[in-house]
Amino acid sequence: MGLSDQIERIRAAEGDPLALVGEFRRTVVLVPIVDDVLMSAHHQGIRWIYAFTDEPALARFALSRGSAPDEPWDFERVLGARLLDAVVPALDGPAGVAVDVADPEAAMLFPPARGIVPDIAAVDVVDGAARTPRGEGAR
């Protein structure tokens, strides 16, 4: 079962969250590159790295951002585990991964929560704002 299938099962309330995270870790995703940096956006104090399950999903995202259908987008193929275990902890502040965000029925977030990212990169959410757990300093 692939990542898209695991996401579909979770969205249908039939899946196993641990299996979903495991599948994401084993999957190579496409991450758009802008100015030699992985493309991301900030929302409510968290940086979300954009990742896509395949080129058509990335193309739908590009179109939703106003790109022409034939406009090329640079991207890197990155193992999900590398995003969660190496990239997220290296960023300044809380970060997670947003998968297939141009597809409302297929999108999935992997937040900076324990069990998803390393504990040092995990945050708690208090009053809608991301905070480092138990008073630990910012990364």
Image (cartoon, rainbow, N blue to C red):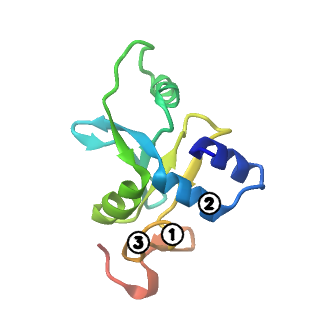
Spatial CA distance of label 3 from label 1 is 8 Å
Q: Is residue 64 left or right of residue 136?
A: right
Q: Which mark is residue 118?
A: 3
Q: Which mark is residue 113?
A: 1
Q: Which residue is mark 2?
A: 19
Residue at the extreme front of the image, as rendered: 1
Q: Quadrant of residue 62?
A: top left
Judge whether residue 48 can be spotted in this image. Answer: no
Query: Against 95, is 100 above or below?
Result: above
Q: Is residue 89 left or right of residue 20?
A: left
Residue 93 image point, x, y percent: 34, 65
- Indicate the amino acid at tag 1: Ala
Residue occupying the point 41% across, 57% down = 81
Q: Nearer the viewer, residue 70 or 15?
A: 15
Spatial CA distance of label 2 from label 1 is 16 Å
**CB atoms at circles 3 and 1 under 8 Å apart?**
no
